[in-house]
Amino acid sequence: GEVAKRRKGRSGEKRKIKVGGAGGGDGSGKEKVTQVSGDLKKGNQAVPQTFNDMFAFNTAVMGFSSHTWMGEILLSFDVIVTNTANSYRLQEECDVVSLRLAKYKGQLILSDFKSVMLASLRSLVKDWGSAHEVAWSWLWSNVERLLQAMLGKPKHMESALSAFLKSIDEETMAFIRREIYSKFFTLAPGGQDYFKQSTTRLHFIADKVVSMTMDMYKDPKKLVEDISALGLRHVGYGIPTPLFSPFVTCTIQVVASLTKDPTAEEAFRWSLGLLSRILVRVIIEGSTIVMKAINANSAKQLKLAVACAPRGKRANWMLHVQVGTQSISPFMIAIKNGALDAAQAIL
């Protein structure tokens, strides 16, 4: 029905104002959206100014509040957008997102995210036009294609890999440790210069690599953070990134020889491949010219590197390197690694 309200106008007379009630409208929810939008314009509520806030607002207005999985995509959306032209990086991020989406039950309709995304962008971009619509729709079509390719697979892969790893006894694990390094040093002899630790330490690394392939399925958020931190530590070690590929290849060959389950083999291969991609990327991004000078323990190189820094940024270049949410201190790395010439130059 309609509710009649009376209020006084500027001239003092009383007027009737009709407001649509619960029974009005065509059931499409347009009245509700119009009313909320009007309240925002009148200042009754704070108007969302950021994409994340506007996305949360439109999620509620469009009836997608129960789609909590959208938050997982939104968490990586900045990385996805900024790496649109980098297909390698885009694939990596979508693979990580697909693992996080696998934790949600029920059917995931990815096109719903596109609807909320476009509605949010239209509200925030003042000169929004057809070119924007085409560009952002194209972006999402690529992301959706990558995510759709993995929907439903991580759970089966996790189950198969878990069953395989549980079947490995201590004798088999000892075989894996020996064979990995035997094959790796044959394939990449230069790797012996960087694996100078004790046998116990080398065995620990092999065990950790195998267990991390399972952890990637169990808790992808935490493992990505751990791998990022590990990658930054490797920046200080100065290990060449070309060595990672043969190490991964040898590990996969050894493990594949122990199982006849193609799903378990593919699960291990896919997980370890993703781990290595993340690790290599973090090392490359963290290997600044300052860190390269520290690894070479060259005061001259360090001074030349710092000279490239913008005014007011020199101290930050020497004291802070950040990749994602993880960071290291080049100065502390120099002291820890015994690069005293570089450390002295920093001081």
Image: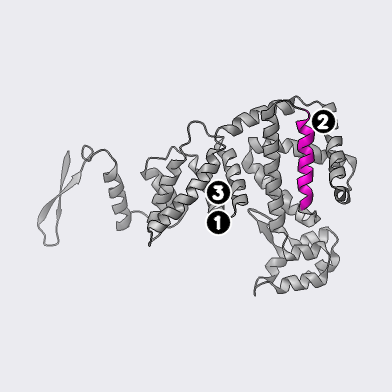
Q: Can residue 165 be seen at all in this image of the molecule?
A: yes
What's the amino acid at mark 1? Thr
Q: Is residue 240 left or right of residue 46?
A: right
Between the residue at mark 1 and the residue at mark 2, the CA separation in whole angstroms equals 42 Å
**Badge 1: few (under 14), some or many (20 or more) residues near its Cα, within 10 Å?**
few
Q: Which element is circle 3 on?
A: helix
**Colour pattern of the rendering:** one colour
Which residue is painted at 85% across and 40% down in the image? Answer: 183
Question: Residue at the spot x=71%, y=49% of the render?
Answer: 279
Marks 3,1: beta carbons within 8 A: no
Q: CA distance from mark 3 to mark 2?
A: 36 Å
From mark 3 to mark 1, how far is it between C-alphas? 10 Å
Quarter of the picture holding the C terminus:
bottom right
Badge 3 or badge 2: first in the primary sequence: 3
Q: Is residue 90 left or right of residue 278?
A: left
What residue is pinned by disc 2?
173
Residue 252 magenta-drawn? Answer: yes
Query: Callout 3, which amino acid?
Result: Ser
Residue position for label 1: 82
Mark 2, secondary structure of its residue: helix
Q: Position of residue 253 (x, y in %)?
A: 78, 35
Tell me where residue 271 appears, x and y as whole percent: 68, 38
Q: Is residue 251 left or right of residue 29?
A: right
Percent coordinates x, y for residue 180 in the rendering: 83, 38
